[in-house]
Amino acid sequence: MGGETIGPIISVERLTKRFGAFTAVDRISFQVEQGELFAFLGPNGAGKTTTIKMLTTLLRPTEGTLRVDGFDPAHEQNNVRKSFGIVFQDPSLDDELTAYENMEFHAVLYSLPKALRTERILHLLKFVQLADRKDSLVKTFSGGMKRRLEIARGLIHHPRLMFLDEPSLGLDPQTRNHMWEYLKKLNREEHMAVFFTTHYMEEAEKVAGRVAIIDNGKIIDTGTPAELKKKTHSSTLEQAFLSLTGHSMRDEASTGAERMRLHKRMWGR
Amino acid sequence: MGVIYIMWLRQLKKYWRSKPRMIGSLGQPLLFLVALGFGFGPIYQKAAGGSYIDFLAPGVIAMSILFTAMFTGIEVIWDRQFGFLKETLVAPVSRKDIMIGRTLGGATVSVFQGIVVFLIALLFGFRVGNPILIPAALLFMFLIALLFTAFGTAVASRLEDMQAFPLIMNFIIMPIFFLSGALFPLQGLPKGIAIAAGFDPLTYGVDGLRWALTGISHFSPWLDMGVLAVITLCAGIVGTWFFSKIQI
Ligand SMILES: Nc1ncnc2c1ncn2[C@@H]1O[C@H](COP(=O)(O)OP(=O)(O)OP(=O)(O)O)[C@@H](O)[C@H]1O
Ligand SMILES: [Mg+2]
């Protein structure tokens, strides 16, 4: 049974995903407690998004067991989907709808009552400073504006668990801070757990209660930022991250790839 | 507001907002009516007796519904590529409802397109046999639309990207159209073509529509209706099944 369990909100055991002969996620195990702010960190191609896809019912695992809010995402999809919200790494808006319509669509999918729906949508659009553009088609937005809208949309319903796959991608520092304040408030007041990935280590250090570091599909270490720093004799989480994952760049050179992806987000779609 | 309604509404909005597509998709039926209607008119009159445009118009209406419906069904691939599909797939609603809403939306749009072509055909001299049967014509149009939207969604659910589109166009949509008896009568066909036409679901749609609009048909309209309803139901079930199995 799930839904109102007291156990961990996510628990993953020897989870594996292979694409053909390539193993993207390799027997990883970890747990996320209720109401925890959990950072899932790793270089490009480490397997973060693949893991999130499996947890959110978008991809079937090859092996291993996983539980989200007590349910199995591979078999009890409908129950699991009631428990979480997600902001994807890749674009997920309908370009041919307006900002407001995208928000409303989401609110209906998550069956928010009508009164709450309008109120919350307007509030969030103001929050991400898109209130004056609410009736513009999304295809007329800049990359950062689209990202802000995606964040706002993810916050319409208040799930017990929120997945954020690189939420800060393409956001200016003001918006980023703003977003984290909002998330932390939801975390405090509604005990919402947050599972997020980011390539900004200072962000993870500031926000996360606990961190898991994944590289080449394997979890290398988990712990609080303080624990990881202590273990690696580092003064920042970034240094700890680099000493755990090595300094060499990944198949997609990390900074270059990040820049290119940012660029693509801004201009490419 | 429910899931089915909002999915339906989305299809309508997208259709209404893409005027170039709307107008563009009228080009082909128009061409068929003009080129074939006037081009073959005299020969048809001599050979079969009667007006070719009366024979042709139901076929061209069915064609425009076929194309619009298949394309709105196949839009699933676009949604996947532009990422919006993820948003609907992780939501706590049954994929069956998403599929129903999508299909109803696509079908509504396609029927609308069919009605526009019908009106254009009237301008070209098409005469309706018995106006009382227009609701029956609409029913046939709606069934054709539902069938091919669901079918398009089923096909698209199994594909990753648009690369297979020319294949779908040339090996599915075109044969379905050309073998359906939309352009030529089914009487006295060579055996091979007759059999192929018998397996083509659009054959029954065109035949039923032709009956409702002109009073002439090859099969009994009840047979047309029955076959179409059963195949539509199957396409709906298969489409829902494939759609609910999509992974990203
Ligand atoms: N559908 C797929 N088919 C084949 N390989 C895939 C597929 N999806 C992901 N991969 C591979 O799996 C690995 C992990 O990808 P994933 O997207 O999970 O990385 P990530 O940790 O999210 O990286 P990033 O920081 O760049 O977002 C990569 O090497 C990627 O090429
Ligand atoms: Mg990723």
Image (cartoon, grey):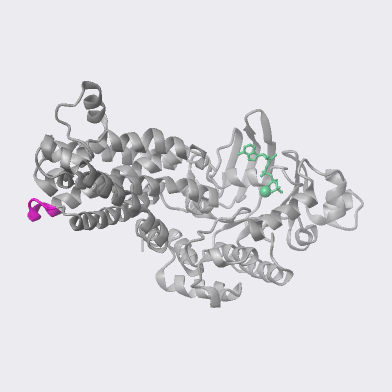
Residues B48 and A111: in front is B48
The residue located at (25%, 44%) in the rendering is B36
The residue located at (54%, 52%) in the rendering is B82
Ligand 1 in which quarter: top right
Q: Residue B5 location, x and y as percent? A: 35, 59
User: Can residue B248 be found in the magenta stretch?
Assistant: no
The residue located at (62%, 29%) in the rendering is A20
Q: Residue A268 location, x and y as percent? A: 63, 56
In this view of the protein, can residue B145 be seen by the observer?
no
User: Can residue B130 be found in the magenta stretch?
Assistant: yes
Q: How many labels does the image show?
A: 0
Residue farthest toward the top in the current orientation of the protein: B191
Residues B193 and B245: in front is B193
On-image quarter of the N terminus of chain B = bottom left
Residue farthest toward the right in the current orientation of the protein: A233
Residues A19 and B75: in front is B75
Q: Based on the displayed image, in which of its 4 quarters is residue A12 positioned?
A: top right
- Vertical order, A168 against B60 (above or below): below
Q: Residue A181 location, x and y as percent? A: 68, 70
In this view of the protein, can residue B53 be seen by the observer?
yes
- With A249 as the anchor, is A263 left or right in this view? left
Residue stretch rendered in magenta on the structure: B127-134
Q: Residue B75 location, x and y as percent? A: 44, 48
